Image (cartoon, rainbow, N blue to C red):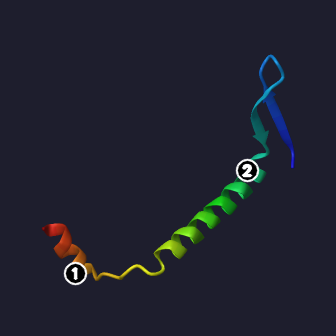
Amino acid sequence: MVKEYITDEKGNIKSVVLDYVFYQQIESVIEDFLLGKIIAETENDVDISLEDTKLLISK
């Protein structure tokens, strides 16, 4: 993992520069994790038909 640090005048790290391919890999892992979390949270939700949805929206 290649990375560079951007520091202020006192040497405090303010940002990290990552290789773009590595960044994409991290982004993919986060997206997969969040999708799994959303799926798990909605597993027990009640399904509603398209027609019922249209009726609810039209009210």
Tell me if 51 is positioned left or right of 32 in this view: left
Q: Looking at the image, which residue is at 77% across and 21% down?
A: 8
Q: Are discs 2 and 1 less than 8 Å apart at CB? A: no
**Mark 2 and mark 1: Cα distance apart in space:** 42 Å
Q: Looking at the image, which residue is at 87% across and 49% down?
A: 1
Q: Which mark is residue 1?
A: none
Horizontal and vertical percent position of residue 39:
52, 74
**Callout 2 secondary element:** helix
Horizontal and vertical percent position of residue 31:
61, 61
Of all residues, the one furthest to the right in this rendering is 2
Q: Looking at the image, which residue is at 78% across and 43% down?
A: 18
**Callout 1 secondary element:** helix
Residue occupied by mark 1 = 51
Q: Looking at the image, which residue is at 22% across and 80% down?
A: 52
Name the amino acid, label 2.
Tyr
Of all residues, the one furthest to the top in this rendering is 9
Name the amino acid, label 1.
Glu
Of all residues, the one furthest to the left in this rendering is 59
Tell me if 41 is positioned left or right of 28 in this view: left
Residue occupied by mark 2 = 23
Dot 1: few (<14), some (14–19), or many (≥20) neighbours within 10 Å? few
Horizontal and vertical percent position of residue 12:
80, 26
